[in-house]
Each structure stands twice: as structure tokens, then as C-alpha cells.
Image (spheres, rainbow, N blue to C red):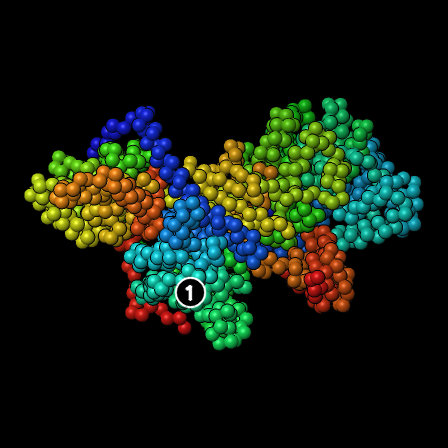
């Protein structure tokens, strides 16, 4: 511990996306010069635009840019950065990097390397916590890694059991095992995933706590001996062990429990001589018992909910601590006000097992009265190289339900077009009774959506009515711009025979929509026999106000040059294209037997051979991309005619993997 | 300038009665128009089975959403080929009108192939000829969605064949004037009809259903004994690859129409068109909706035509020209949707002063290059010794001469009576106004039926008196009834519109919008400079 105070006048943020922007915003407010680093894929990314200075540190793959500590430090030296903020992920919990930063005479905005090292190793950290008297989940964190040893240890701990990568995080390398018989396979898979992801196949075992809540405590420590906690966050709503919804406070928290957990977290921080912002994660079971899970030695993704309820700027506190100043408040001065909820907007398709998605961002627009920390902007692109989380949306309210409603309202007016995303899923989650009652545990998504996962279902007639009315209004506006017709004549047909007719294919069905102007300047809309009355007010190129059967509706839209219409309704995002505008190619996509890589990634395995007969839905290949494994399924019945890609190779999106000769239709 | 002070009491019984009478006629109009839609829709399943879109959906997809569409000749052929008012289907199996494609004002013609497979009707073809003539006059690109069984040989008339030749002649004239013509072949276009694509500048062919052949398979068999396959003979796929008669091949009707829009859009047709000089304007102070209650459907009941004008023009604001001279003839200077225009209306028959005033007014409009609108409610020029001595013939003649020869756009409406030479002086059918529409209460002819009957009785009575014979009152009564029936049947707007003696019947409450559209269209034509060529564009 030192009492030397330094002044940070310039800060390099060794990260990208929303967190880079978030850190730089606080820095700029404090008058600190900001320096961004970026990969070649991010040359036009928002964080680069925002920064005072920016340095390209390498090629798009993270190993060649954002994970290159040497390049980051070189950039910092070149641009005379006083400090480096690592954000989260990438180099943030890399002790070697932190050490190298300090060796270069630059302040590392984070904890001491010793704390990073201990907490970065699940086995070591657990042992340290047990020593410090912090309650831990019963388990095995030994050095002996042979299957036999692990199986024996598992029998002692008891089933169900969690198999985890010792160096892991973010859910990767984690397996829930229900029975002893399933253990050997699980060990094999977890080990290989851990090796791929972290370069170490070291595993630990933990008793699985059934239907626990994930509750974490935000701690802060300075160089002057002060360690405080800023209350908890409940991050129980997870899928594949990745957080989806986070909130503060925890819905079942009591003053006593908070005091106890807070105390445990502070003890944990003290046990590793912590400094700066850290998060101690616990599992909270139904009886109110809590167990240490891990400590994250960095700023968390979900820190904004803590900021919302405490009124503090956590990045500002981090910088204060990094400058050697004492924390500006003591434990008794921490006040929790109201309730905040955050959701994570991912570029992924929730209806297709959350398959990460890439593509152009036609439009990104945030709703009102919410905090949106985004790393993307309209006109940008989501590349396959980085994490699929593109934005966080946070709402604060006096009560939990007020925050929830405000978030629903804000999300309903948030639009992301061009790339599949989980906005609608998040809206569905926030609207679920279980969640609304504050009863969601880590089992919530599995229990609510089951094996099949979330399915938005087919759009109802009202949605098509909205689309039809909007197409009418947009078509009218486009034509009116090309001509000099009196506004009075719009929608006028002397024989009342004017209509806009569209047919929208959705799956196997075709929905026809007829829009007719009525005498009063509104539209009569027919959707397959169902009638609606609507009026439309188009505001600019991406927003419209509608009345549909008397109900008012604000929506965002985007009309692609090719005629595809994207709509963001309060509870649903949708893209529609009249069948006339659908290119023959698009119509036949998948139906022609050509199997292409859905995204950039590594082709792990091809499960079929030339000449094999396959049926629609059969697994053809496995692609690893965006840190996840994706199965590629056959879209048609037929015979595998040609295999064009080799397993183990890195392939770009749309690269041909194989070709199926479709079976003759019968 | 002052806003016109209306004397109409919109809460009066007379207003309510007028409105009820007029709206009943509008309902009749809409019911007649609906007959064609209903008849066509009966074939919906057939279109679907063939993978086709019904004609109205083709048209809806062709036109820009929500842009105005002025239907032309919606009642054509009514009571013409089928004289039974109960069964006669108006429309003539054609849908004609002026609408917008990619912001370009166009004349469009869609064959209503839901009715007798789009077979030609006398009224429909003559209406289409009119539409072509209008396209020439108004410089409108001409787009035809083709699917027609051709002429029905069972109802062959030599005149129809003879007149139909003009359809192709007009395509050649349009092309030579520099006005593009475009056809989408949705279905068959055989015999003479094959020249429809052949002579159009651009042809979009729809696969599987589009067909063009000089002789269909049946005719070929009869003529030469060859057993030909219809698609082989004239399918669009063949034309796209073998003859070069199809430029763009579409998968289906919707894509065909989308291609037509694309071709039109790429012409950048409005690039060389200056924007209009439109003055700022306010809507009428007096609601156009009130027209239905202002005008009695019986033309013999007098009303002030200025009450109609006030419900049509910008801000209900107009300047009356020579209000005190020949007051039964009303001439005003005003504007509609920001475009200056002169309007002539009638509060009684033409007398020498009225005819003189009108002539003066027409010449002034011509001098100032301002369009003239004729609101016809005219029973004719005054008769009697006093008027003959005052030179009624001379004054009427100079008026008709002026109407004929003014060089400005002329837009006529039949809003009540339009009889005899009064119709000529008010730019009736024969004077080829740029636009001519009727209200459903309109009544046209050489004179009113009652007047004709009384005239004939008078002639008979005078003859009887000269011969010293008693008048056969009963016979005269019978004759009067017969004459009234002959006149009565032919004077109705629905009947005359069925014979293409106007461009269509409109809802009187739409008058401002129809006139505004007509003015915009006429003035746009004047601003547009074409690039004519000598022979039209030859299909290569």
C-alpha cells in the first residue's frame, strides 16, 4: 500500500465497444485526454470516433490486437498515456499485463497483480476464501486432474455437480452433471473447451446448488485501508451461464442478509489485499444461505445498476483510487435508492438457439428515459470477431416494478435493424410473471422457455396491418418526393379504387394485406379477412406514429433499398418483404442444397461424407465462432455431393462448406 | 379579396333533401362501378390457380401507394352492348386512369381479364382509344397491363375491327412524339392484340402465362392445319429468347409489375420537368362536402352556381367578372390548389349580354394563358323575337368560336343540365375539352325531354289547326310520353358515360380534387418538353 498520489491526465482504454466508450465518457468529463486502441476491423467503430486519439494495434482477431498487451503498452507509451484502463474481458484480468503496464511506468486502473492472480484461479481463490472464513460451495479444487481422481472427488461432493474450468469465466468450460455416469463425458468436453478457450484444461468441481440466485456484491478498496461495498446485484437471469438481466437491489434481499454478504465480500477483498473496483459473486439458495463463487477483479458489465441505485460513477471512483486518492465515501455513507434493472442486448438469434449474428447495422436507436451504453451505431457493422453483446439498456425507478415498466417502455422504443438480436426476448423476459414477481432464479430461463427455447411465434394480423399501413405511407412519401402533386390530392381516387396490396411470405404461409384510404384520411386495412382502421404519421426516415383501431403506437422502422421493411414494435421486431421484391435467390436460400458458413469461424468438424444421404434437420458440421460451437443442419433432404471445406480451418462467412444434391420432390 | 358569403343554410330541410337526393345518386354510381369488381372477383380462384394476380392487384402494385388516381371511363359500355339496366356491367373490361408510377404521372390501362377473359367490348376499346388520345395530348407515358382474349368472334362487328386499328396507330404516334409506351404481358395478347406488345417501346413478359401470337393455336390449326403448342407459338419465354419481342422476363405478375415500375423509374422522366408555379393557397372556407346539399338534383330548381364555386376554389375566394352585365352567366377569376383559372357557370340561359361577356372572358383567359373551367348547367341560348333581333345567333356563334379556339387547357363538368347549343358554348363533348366529367345528376341532350315533347305537340296542334282538324288529345299525350321516354333514357349521366360522351361520372363532393388534379395534369403537360422523332422507336 502506498500513499503516493499521481494525477492521471491521459488515459488509454485497452478495450472496445460500449465499455471503452463508457470509460472514456467519464474520463472526458474529468478533463482527461482519451486514447483508444482498435483493430483493423474497428477502424470506424464508435469508440474510435469518440476518443481524442486512436491507435491501431493489429488485425481483427483478438489474439492479434486486443489481447496483445505489448502493442497496447507500446501505444500507451507512444501517446504518453498516464494510465491504462482495461475495461472488462480482454486484458482486464491478466496479471502479466498488469505487471508489464506498471513496469512501463504507467498506472494500471485495476487491482494489484497478486489479487488478479489469486482470484483468476478458481481453485486457489477458493482455498484462500475458505481460509478467510468466506462461505464456499462444497467441492474439489485439487491439483490432481486425472479422471479417476475427479470422479472420486465428485462422489464425495455429491450430485448434481458442476464441472468448471479453473481458469474459466463467462460460462465457458462449464458443465452441469446430474449423474455419475455422465461425468466422464462431461469431463472430456469441459477439458477440451477449457483448453481451447483458456489454454489450460485444469478443472474444479462444485456441488450444484439447485435453483440458486446469482447475487454479487460490488466492493471498492482504496490505498488508504478503506474497503467498502456498494450493495448487491442480482444476476440470476442467465442462459448458458451468461447474464441476460441484472438488477439492484436483489428482490429477496434483507438488510441483515445484505450486511452479512457485504461483510463477506469485504473480507474476501481484504484477504487478497484488494484495491479498486471488484465484484464478489455468490450463489444464494432458497434458504438464504450464500456461497462464494468467484471474485471478478475488474469493472463488471452490469456496474450501471449499482451506479443507478447509489448515484455514484464507478469509473470515476476507479480513477480516484488509481490516482492514490482515498475513497470519497465510507460504508455508512452508501445509500441505495430505488431499483435499477439492466438488460444486455446481444446480436444473436434467440429463436435459433441464440446463434450469434453478424451484419450491417441499418439502424440503432435507443428509447427514451433509459440509459443505453452501446458500442454500436447506425451505419456500422457487427463483425464476427468480438463478443456479441452490443449494448446494455438500464432503467431506474422508485420501485422495482417502476424500473421494470420503464425498461419495457424504453426497450419497446429501442430498435436494432440489420442483425438478429435478442430485444424481443428481453421484452418477453421482463414481461414474464415470474420475473415481474421477483422470483427469477438462475433456473428461470430454462424453466420458462424449456428445451425448445424461446419462440416469438408467428406475427398476428395486427402486425401485418401496421406493416401494410406503413408501406402505404412510405410508398406515398417516396412518390410524392418525385412529383409535384398537391398534398390535398394524396390518397384521392376518384372511383375509390385505390389500394396498396402486399403479400408477405412468413415461413410457409403467405399473408396478404390490403390498405385502402377511407373518406376521413385514415386507412381501412384487411389482413386475410380481418379488418383494421389505421392512420400513420411518418416522422423522418426511421420513426412513425400509428393509430391502430384507436390505440396509439410509436414505432421505428427501416426500409432497405431492396424493399425489405424492418419494424420495431413495442413487443416485437420484425422484417417483412413483399413476395415480388424477394429475389429468386433469397426465396431459394437453403432450398438449393448449398451449405455455407453462417458466420466467420473455425470449422471444427464435418459430420458427413460425400455420398451420404441426409435428411432435413440432420447435423452436417460444427463451426466454432464467437466462442460458441454452432451446429450446421441440413435444410433439405438429399445426398452429400461435394465437401468443399476442411475441418480445422478458419473460414469466412458465406464460404461454401458442402453441397447437397436435393432429393427430387415427390 | 372577400371570401364569398354563402346564403345556404346547411341546417335547412332543402339542404338535407338535396343532399339525400344527391348521395343516393352517388350510391348508384358506386353500385354500378362495383358490378365490374364483383364480376371480376368471381374469377379470383382461376387467377390463383394459374399463379396469377387478379387485374386490380396488378394495377394496385403498378401504381404508387396513396398517390392520386383519376379513373377514366369507369362506366364505359354501360347499356351499350347489354341494354338491360339490371344486368349491364359497366367498365368494358378495361380499367383506365391517370396515376403515378415512381412519381411519374402516367396513363394506365389494365385489362380486366376477370370479366370474359378480358375480351374486347365496344365501349372499352373506344374508351381506351380516348385514353391514348389523352396520353398524346397530356404527354403521359402509356402503360398497359395486357391480358385479353381479344375480340369475341360471336359478337363481331366490322366497325369494332376498323376502329381497333387506331389503338396501334396511337402507339406509333405516342412513340414518335417521344412519349414512352410500356406493356406488361400478363396473359394472352393474340391476333391484332399481338401488336400491342409489338408496338410498345418496352415489353415485360410474365413467364408461363404471358403470350403474344398473331394467331392462337386454334386459328393456326384452322388456317394451316399445323398443330401448334401455345407456349411454343407465342410464350413470353420464347419471345425473350427467340424473337426479341420481350425485353424483360418476369417470374410472375408481381415481379412483372415491379419491373415495369423499375423501367419507368429509370427513365428519370421528371428530370427535365420544371416544378409548377403554384401559389400559396388555403382550402375553401366553405366545405366542399356541402356541395351535395347545395345543388338540387332537379335542374329545373334554380340555385346560385356561385355557391358551388365557393365550395371548390381556394379560400372560397374569387373575383366576379362583369357581375352586373348578363348576370345569368357567371364568370369568375380564381384559383384551385394554387393554380390560377377562370370559371364559367350558369344561373340561367345565355342571353346576348351573357354570351358576349363569356366570349370576352374566354379571350382574356387565353390572353393571360389561364385555364378555363366550364360548370355546365345550361338549358341553351334564349329564343324569341326579342332575342333573335338582339343577335342571339351572332353572339352565341362568337362564343362557340372562342370556346373552340382558345389555346388554354379547358376542363368541363356537367353539373346539371347541358342542352343543345348551350352544351357547345360550354365546351361540351364535341369540343374536346381536356377533361370532361359529369355529376350523377347531370342531364344532357339536344333539349329536355319535356320540352321536346311539348314542342312536338305544338307542331301537331299547329298542323291540325291549319288543316282544320280537331286535335287528338289522347294521341298527343301518348306521343309526349313516348318522346319523354326516348329523351329520358338517353339524357342520364350513367347512360351518356356508358357511351364515352364524357370521361366519367364523379362524386360532386370530389369536384375540387378532380379539378385540381386536371389542372395539375394539364399544366404539367404544358411544361413538359418532349423529344419527338419521326417514326417512333422501332422494335429491333
- In the image: residue A380, left or right of residue A119: left
Total marks shown come to 1
Q: In which quarter of the image is residue B294?
A: top left
Q: Name the residue under label 1.
A: B193
- Dot 1 surroundings within 10 Å: few (below 14), some, or many (20 or more)? many
The x, y position of residue B425, in whole percent, is: 19, 47
Image vertical order of residue A366 relative to residue B41, above or below? above
Q: Confirm whether residue B438 shows in the render.
A: no
Classify the position of the C terminus of chain B by image quarter. bottom left
Q: Residue furthest front?
A: B469
Q: Residue at position x 37%, y 55% from top?
A: B123
Q: Confirm whether residue B179 shows in the render.
A: yes
Q: Quadrant of residue B133?
A: bottom left
Q: Residue at position x 29%, y 35% from top?
A: B298
The x, y position of residue A538, in whole percent, is: 46, 41
Viewer-nearest residue: B395 or B410: B395
**SS for tag 1?**
helix
- Write down the chain letter for disc 1: B
Q: Residue at position x 43%, y 45% from top?
A: B86
The x, y position of residue A53, in whole percent, is: 53, 49
- In the image: residue B369, left or right of residue A369: left
Classify the position of the N terminus of chain B by image quarter. top left
Q: Residue at position x 44%, y 41% from top?
A: A517
The x, y position of residue A123, in whole percent, is: 82, 43
- In the image: residue B286, left or right of residue A64: left
Viewer-nearest residue: A657 or B491: B491
Amino acid at each position: 500500500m502506498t500513499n503516493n498520489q499521481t494525477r492521471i491526465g491521459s488515459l488509454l482504454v485497452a478495450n472496445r465497444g460500449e465499455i471503452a466508450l463508457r470509460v472514456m465518457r467519464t474520463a472526458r468529463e474529468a478533463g482527461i485526454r482519451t486514447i483508444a486502441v482498435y483493430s483493423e476491423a474497428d477502424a470506424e467503430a464508435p469508440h474510435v470516433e469518440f476518443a481524442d486519439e486512436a491507435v491501431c494495434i493489429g488485425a481483427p482477431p483478438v489474439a492479434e490486437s486486443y489481447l496483445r498487451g505489448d502493442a497496447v503498452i507500446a501505444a500507451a507509451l507512444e501517446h504518453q498515456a498516464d494510465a491504462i484502463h482495461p475495461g472488462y474481458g480482454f486484458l482486464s484480468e491478466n496479471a502479466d499485463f498488469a505487471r508489464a503496464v506498471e513496469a512501463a511506468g504507467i498506472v494500471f486502473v485495476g487491482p494489484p497483480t497478486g489479487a488478479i492472480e489469486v482470484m483468476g484461479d478458481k481453485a486457489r481463490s477458493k482455498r484462500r476464501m475458505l481460509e478467510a472464513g468466506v462461505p464456499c460451495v462444497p467441492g474439489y479444487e485439487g491439483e490432481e486432474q486425472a479422471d479417476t481422481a475427479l470422479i472420486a472427488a465428485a462422489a464425495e461432493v455429491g450430485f448434481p455437480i458442476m464441472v468448471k474450468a479453473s481458469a474459466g469465466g463467462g460460462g465457458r468450460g462449464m458443465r452441469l452433471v446430474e449423474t455419475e455416469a455422465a461425468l466422464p463425458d462431461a469431463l472430456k468436453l469441459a477439458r477440451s473447451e477449457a483448453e481451447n478457450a483458456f489454454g489450460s484444461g485444469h478443472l474444479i468441481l462444485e456441488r450444484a446448488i439447485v435453483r440458486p440466485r446469482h447475487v454479487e456484491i460490488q466492493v471498492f478498496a482504496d490505498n488508504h485501508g478503506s474497503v467498502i461495498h456498494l450493495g448487491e446485484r442480482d444476476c440470476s437471469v442467465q442462459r448458458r451461464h451468461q447474464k441476460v438481466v441484472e438488477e439492484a437491489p436483489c428482490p429477496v434481499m434483507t438488510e441483515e442478509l445484505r450486511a452479512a454478504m457485504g461483510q463477506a465480500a469485504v473480507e474476501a477483498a481484504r484477504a487478497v489485499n484488494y484495491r479498486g473496483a471488484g465484484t464478489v459473486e455468490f450463489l444464494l439458495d432458497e434458504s438464504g444461505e450464500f456461497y462464494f463463487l468467484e471474485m471478478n477483479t475488474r469493472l463488471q458489465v452490469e456496474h450501471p445498476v449499482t451506479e443507478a441505485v447509489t448515484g455514484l460513477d464507478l469509473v470515476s471512483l476507479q480513477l480516484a483510487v488509481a490516482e492514490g486518492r482515498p475513497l470519497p465515501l465510507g460504508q455508512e455513507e452508501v445509500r441505495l435508492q430505488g431499483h435499477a434493472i439492466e438488460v444486455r442486448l446481444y446480436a444473436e438469434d434467440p429463436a435459433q438457439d441464440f446463434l450469434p449474428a453478424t451484419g450491417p447495422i441499418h439502424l440503432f436507436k435507443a428509447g427514451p428515459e433509459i440509459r443505453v451504453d452501446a458500442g454500436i451505431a447506425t451505419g456500422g457493422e457487427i463483425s464476427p470477431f468480438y463478443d456479441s453483446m452490443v449494448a446494455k439498456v438500464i432503467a431506474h425507478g422508485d420501485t422495482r416494478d417502476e424500473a421494470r415498466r420503464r425498461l419495457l417502455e424504453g426497450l419497446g422504443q429501442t430498435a436494432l435493424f440489420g442483425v438478429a438480436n435478442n430485444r424481443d426476448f428481453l421484452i418477453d423476459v421482463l414481461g414474464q410473471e415470474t420475473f415481474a414477481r421477483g422470483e427469477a432464479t438462475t433456473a428461470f430461463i430454462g424453466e420458462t422457455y424449456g428445451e425448445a427455447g424461446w419462440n416469438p411465434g408467428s406475427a398476428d394480423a395486427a402486425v401485418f396491418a401496421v406493416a401494410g399501413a406503413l408501406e402505404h405511407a412510405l410508398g406515398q412519401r417516396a412518390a410524392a418526393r418525385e412529383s409535384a402533386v398537391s398534398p390535398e390530392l394524396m390518397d384521392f381516387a376518384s372511383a375509390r379504387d385505390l389500394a396498396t396490396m402486399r403479400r408477405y411470405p412468413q415461413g410457409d404461409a403467405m399473408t396478404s394485406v390490403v390498405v385502402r384510404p377511407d373518406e376521413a384520411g385514415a386507412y381501412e386495412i384487411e389482413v386475410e379477412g380481418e379488418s383494421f382502421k389505421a392512420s400513420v404519421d411518418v416522422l423522418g426516415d426511421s420513426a412513425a406514429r400509428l393509430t391502430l383501431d384507436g390505440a396509439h403506437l410509436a414505432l421505428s422502422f427501416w426500409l432497405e433499398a431492396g424493399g425489405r421493411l424492418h419494424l420495431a414494435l413495442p413487443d416485437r421486431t420484425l422484417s417483412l418483404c413483399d413476395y415480388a421484391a424477394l429475389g429468386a435467390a433469397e426465396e431459394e436460400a437453403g432450398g438449393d442444397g448449398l451449405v455455407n458458413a453462417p458466420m466467420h469461424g473455425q470449422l471444427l468438424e464435418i459430420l458427413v461424407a460425400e455420398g451420404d444421404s441426409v435428411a432435413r434437420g440432420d447435423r452436417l458440421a460444427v463451426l466454432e465462432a464467437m466462442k460458441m460451437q454452432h451446429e450446421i443442419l441440413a435444410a433439405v433432404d438429399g445426398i452429400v455431393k461435394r465437401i468443399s471445406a476442411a475441418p480445422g480451418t478458419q473460414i469466412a462467412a458465406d464460404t461454401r462448406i458442402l453441397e447437397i444434391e436435393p432429393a427430387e420432390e415427390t | 379579396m372577400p371570401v364569398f358569403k354563402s346564403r345556404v343554410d346547411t341546417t335547412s330541410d332543402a339542404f338535407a333533401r338535396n343532399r339525400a337526393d344527391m348521395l343516393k345518386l352517388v350510391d348508384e354510381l358506386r353500385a354500378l362501378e362495383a358490378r365490374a369488381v364483383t364480376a371480376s372477383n368471381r374469377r379470383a380462384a382461376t387467377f390463383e390457380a394459374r399463379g396469377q394476380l387478379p387485374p386490380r392487384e396488378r394495377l394496385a402494385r403498378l401504381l404508387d401507394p396513396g398517390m392520386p388516381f383519376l379513373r377514366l371511363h369507369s362506366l364505359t359500355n354501360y347499356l351499350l352492348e347489354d341494354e338491360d339496366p339490371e344486368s349491364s356491367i359497366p367498365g368494358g373490361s378495361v380499367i383506365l386512369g391517370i396515376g403515378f408510377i415512381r412519381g411519374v404521372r402516367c396513363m394506365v390501362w389494365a385489362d380486366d381479364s376477370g370479366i370474359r377473359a378480358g375480351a374486347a367490348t365496344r365501349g372499352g376499346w373506344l374508351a381506351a382509344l380516348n385514353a391514348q388520345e389523352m396520353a398524346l395530348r397530356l404527354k403521359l407515358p402509356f402503360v398497359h397491363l395486357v391480358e385479353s382474349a381479344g375480340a369475341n368472334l360471336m359478337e363481331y362487328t366490322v366497325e369494332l375491327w376498323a376502329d381497333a386499328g387506331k389503338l396501334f396507330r396511337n402507339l406509333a404516334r405516342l412513340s414518335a412524339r417521344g412519349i414512352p409506351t410500356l406493356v406488361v404481358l400478363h396473359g394472352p395478347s393474340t391476333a391484332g392484340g399481338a401488336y400491342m406488345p409489338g408496338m410498345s417501346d418496352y415489353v415485360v413478359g410474365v413467364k408461363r402465362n404471358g403470350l403474344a401470337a398473331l394467331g392462337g393455336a386454334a386459328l393456326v390449326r384452322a388456317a394451316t392445319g399445323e398443330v401448334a403448342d401455345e407456349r411454343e407459338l407465342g410464350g413470353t419465354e420464347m419471345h425473350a429468347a427467340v424473337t426479341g419481342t420481350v425485353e424483360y422476363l418476369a417470374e410472375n405478375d408481381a415481379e412483372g409489375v415491379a419491373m415495369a415500375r423499375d423501367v419507368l423509374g429509370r427513365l428519370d422522366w421528371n428530370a427535365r420537368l420544371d416544378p409548377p408555379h403554384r401559389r400559396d393557397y388555403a382550402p375553401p372556407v366553405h366545405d366542399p362536402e356541402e356541395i351535395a346539399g347545395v345543388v338540387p338534383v332537379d335542374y329545373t330548381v334554380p340555385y346560385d352556381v356561385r355557391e358551388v364555386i365557393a365550395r371548390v376554389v381556394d379560400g372560397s375566394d374569387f373575383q366576379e367578372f362583369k357581375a352586373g352585365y348578363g348576370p345569368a352567366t357567371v364568370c369568375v377569376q380564381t384559383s384551385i390548389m394554387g393554380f390560377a383559372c377562370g370559371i364559367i357557370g350558369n344561373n340561367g340561359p345565355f342571353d346576348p349580354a351573357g354570351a358576349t361577356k363569356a366570349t370576352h372572358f374566354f379571350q382574356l383567359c387565353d390572353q393571360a394563358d389561364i385555364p378555363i373551367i366550364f360548370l355546365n348547367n345550361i338549358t341553351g341560348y334564349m329564343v324569341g323575337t326579342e332575342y333573335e333581333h338582339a343577335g342571339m345567333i351572332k353572339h352565341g356563334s362568337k362564343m362557340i368560336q372562342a370556346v373552340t379556339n382558345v389555346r388554354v387547357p379547358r376542363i368541363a363538368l356537367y353539373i346539371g343540365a347541358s342542352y343543345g347549343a348551350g352544351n357547345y358554348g360550354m365546351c361540351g363533348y364535341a369540343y374536346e375539352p381536356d377533361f370532361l366529367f359529369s355529376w350523377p345528376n347531370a342531364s344532357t341532350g339536344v333539349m329536355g325531354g319535356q320540352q321536346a315533347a311539348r314542342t312536338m305537340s305544338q307542331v301537331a296542334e299547329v298542323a291540325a289547326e291549319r288543316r282544320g282538324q280537331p286535335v287528338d288529345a289522347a294521341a298527343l299525350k301518348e306521343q309526349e310520353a313516348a318522346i319523354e321516354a326516348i329523351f329520358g333514357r338517353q339524357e342520364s349521366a350513367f347512360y351518356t358515360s356508358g357511351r364515352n360522351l364524357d370521361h366519367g361520372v364523379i362524386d360532386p363532393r370530389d369536384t375540387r380534387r378532380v379539378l385540381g388534379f386536371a389542372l395539375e395534369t394539364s399544366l404539367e403537360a404544358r411544361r413538359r418538353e418532349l423529344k419527338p422523332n419521326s417514326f417512333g422507336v422501332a422494335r429491333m
